[in-house]
Image (spheres, coloured by chain):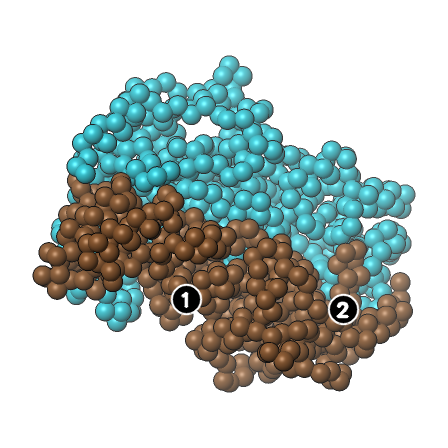
Chain colours: A cyan, B brown
Amino acid sequence: MTCDSALLTDLYQLTMLQGYYDQNREELAVFEFFVRKLPKSRGYMIAAGLAQVLTYLEELRFSPDEIDWLASTGYFKPAVLDRLAAFRFTGDVHAMPEGTVFFPHEPILRVTATLPEAQLIESRLINLLHFQTLIASKAARSVLIAPDRLLVDFGMRRAHGGEAALLAARASYLAGFSGTATVNAGRCFDIPVYGTMAHSFVQTYPGESQAFIDFAKANPDNVVLLIDTYDTEAAAQKVVDLAGTLHRQGIKIKGVRIDSGDLAEHAVKVRRVLDQGGLRQATIFASGGIDEYKLAALMARKAPIDGFGIGTSLDTSADAPYFDCAYKLQEYAGIARRKRSEGKATWPGRKQVYRNHDDDGFMCGDTVTLEGAPCTGQPLLRPVMRAGQILAPQPSLTESRAYAKGQLSQLPEALRQLSDASDYPVIISAELQALAKSVDEQLLL
Amino acid sequence: MTCDSALLTDLYQLTMLQGYYDQNREELAVFEFFVRKLPKSRGYMIAAGLAQVLTYLEELRFSPDEIDWLASTGYFKPAVLDRLAAFRFTGDVHAMPEGTVFFPHEPILRVTATLPEAQLIESRLINLLHFQTLIASKAARSVLIAPDRLLVDFGMRRAHGGEAALLAARASYLAGFSGTATVNAGRCFDIPVYGTMAHSFVQTYPGESQAFIDFAKANPDNVVLLIDTYDTEAAAQKVVDLAGTLHRQGIKIKGVRIDSGDLAEHAVKVRRVLDQGGLRQATIFASGGIDEYKLAALMARKAPIDGFGIGTSLDTSADAPYFDCAYKLQEYAGIARRKRSEGKATWPGRKQVYRNHDDDGFMCGDTVTLEGAPCTGQPLLRPVMRAGQILAPQPSLTESRAYAKGQLSQLPEALRQLSDASDYPVIISAELQALAKSVDEQLLL
């Protein structure tokens, strides 16, 4: 079971390619990826996943055994299988940098390639862009609420499969999280990894104190003790009681974790126990069913919590586990195209998005127009791949994270709310509207 | 970025192992996986993902470069790294067969292994069991509503990453779907693969008719034409008009697909156009934002639709993208254990689940009790792995699918509804309650 297979695609991409190859329909096509509408309660989105898309495009090829398997299905003509065996993506890509704030109707990525090339990549391209954009957009909400706290992705176990766990760790870090508990995400993406102990560790001991001591000795540089297995405040007192013994062995208690109950109430009591016991430096870390709404409530109650593990709600984007997006044909053989299906019409042509800022540096309005049309503002789509080659230099994840932070700092106040945000102005230019009209008129029905 | 790495785990598993190895805490531990409560609107769940768990356990090992990377973090002692390098899972597993209907508080899988072995596997085991169980349980809802229709997983693009797409295809097929559009799922799991054409194929042509003809010639055995790019009924008429020409070339039109608008209304009109045009054999396939609720509405309206592509709502389990589950220590070194954290208490000991049926063969009540305790009914947990080796024979996916069908047929009527179902009786046996009480009394606090 591998995610890197060229066969990770929808069957119709391959049956369409059979049609295109059959009829030599290989002129240049332009597809764009965009969001149709924001998920509920969201006022903006954060572009993410481009790095994985570019790697996918550069490495995409069918192995001999994949071709053999396709042949065994009986769906494909030998000539088509030969074309697939030689398939390489040789097109151009323009995209908003990862970490860019964007809005509906704005293409965040444009592919310019022969029709079969631009078509084949659709399914995996959407799969990669949709998920990381979903998670980065979700994570940003917590980051804006608690910008000075440690925020750690705890979501691997309920992420939808292994790749989701890895990419959620990446996307949340991009959006400003401090790190993740998922070890392989640390390795793959050079993200800080956090974690100490679970309830099971404590449960294997007859009492908590010995469990704490043994853990501390085994992990002397990372002593964060889980104190809610039985009675939270009693366990906090046990931590205080054994701090002296550990201190004499050169081991410092970094902090405690609370994972159940009323986190704010427990945190206040635990803080008092720790402070009175001389452990003012020890931090309190909280986890257990936290999302951005609970985080906001904890911050509003001024809960003395230094860091938060945010798991399921983040990795599944639980309140909005998908958004409405598409990768659509906008031009073929030099002629602009559009889809007009009910409720799903698209804007034709190759587009660019321009952003304007007010005098205080906040974003104040975008315009979607045709590439090359005159427009004020800062263009957001940039070339990132030419003739199938990634253009250097691409930003590192650390650089993208810094860029995302800058983007979030430019969000107008009205969009920073957790509840339904006010609409951000996105203008469809007169040139683009005129082109759509002309495409409709020229269509032979 | 690979999902098969032993590093696909939470950091705390490794820091806990450091503690266990340090103190030679390697006696036998028993962990069980269970669901705490049903997601909203669900009356039952379907166990899925066991096959992937067993493969994971059998193949789990740290490669030399993974050990090197762990060493580079500075978190781990050389002796611990040596243990990890030699790590093998050598424990036993009992589980409900994939496709089993189950309820909260019922363990669906039990691991008996040395404490470090049983601990390390937690994160990935939950990740695999949770997701497929989530999707199988979601898919079963559509299967029960439309048991005689073609149901195809269309969700790859908005699945949460590549592995989710593959596993959602598997889990939905297990629960009774007819197949998937995801090619690699067809290859990996031998699931039927469906798919024909997208709007982009039609849009590259100046008009629809030539697009239909070219597609049909290229894919003569799989002619399902997408008719909603511009005007659905007009396109249906075009299909009728070119049927004769194609027929003379030996090409039969299998069907049409509608992907937008009021699907029932379009289906009625399109059915009329096709029937009047002599295409009574051509099927109508519908897609576009369908979930089990829309499916129920379409069935209630007797929409003449032969098959459905169900995508985003299925692959993300959109109305309930996760459920509350846990993998918890129930016994260590021969002594039963339990967690008592607020709202998260667990039942201790090694358990078995017994199911009873009424005279008509419908499930009528389960009992969770201690393994070996006397109980009426059919035991649901069976041995599936011994000493790290998968016990043969394990059922094929086709066999599990047939078994799931049988399970669904035994569901009482009250649980088959889409809205909040009535509670199914799950009794916690007197033996189990007594053990929990005794564990609490013996705990040294």
State the SS at label 2. Answer: loop
Viewer-nearest residue: B37 or B394: B37
Q: Give x and y (percent) for residue B59.
A: 51, 73
Q: Residues within 10 Å of mark 1 (few under 14, many from 20)?
A: few
View extreme (top): residue: A359
Seen at 19% across and 38% down, the residue is A445
Seen at 59% across and 55% down, the residue is B419
Viewer-nearest residue: B292 or A304: B292
The chain that hosts pointer 2 is B
What's the CA distance linking mark 1 and mark 2?
Answer: 41 Å
Seen at 17% across and 40% down, the residue is B206
Q: Give x and y (percent) for residue B151.
A: 40, 61
Q: Which of marks 1 and 2 is in front?
A: 1
Instruction: Give residue B29's mark.
Output: none
The amino acid at mark 2 is Trp
A351 relative position to B351: left or right:
left
State the SS at label 1. Answer: loop
Q: Give x and y (percent) for residue B400.
A: 49, 75
B312 relative position to B321: left or right:
left
Image position of B304 with respect to B346: above or below: above
The amino acid at mark 1 is Asp
The chain that hosts pointer 1 is B
A202 relative position to A138: left or right:
right
Quadrant where the N terminus of chain A sits is bottom left
Instruction: Tell me if I can see residue B321 in this picture.
Output: yes
User: Which quadrant of the structure image shows residue A201?
Assistant: bottom right
Q: Mark 1 points at which residue?
A: B148
Q: How crowded is mark 2: few (under 14 residues within 10 Å), some or many (20 or more)?
A: many
Q: Mark 2 points at which residue?
A: B347
Seen at 41% across and 59% down, the residue is B153
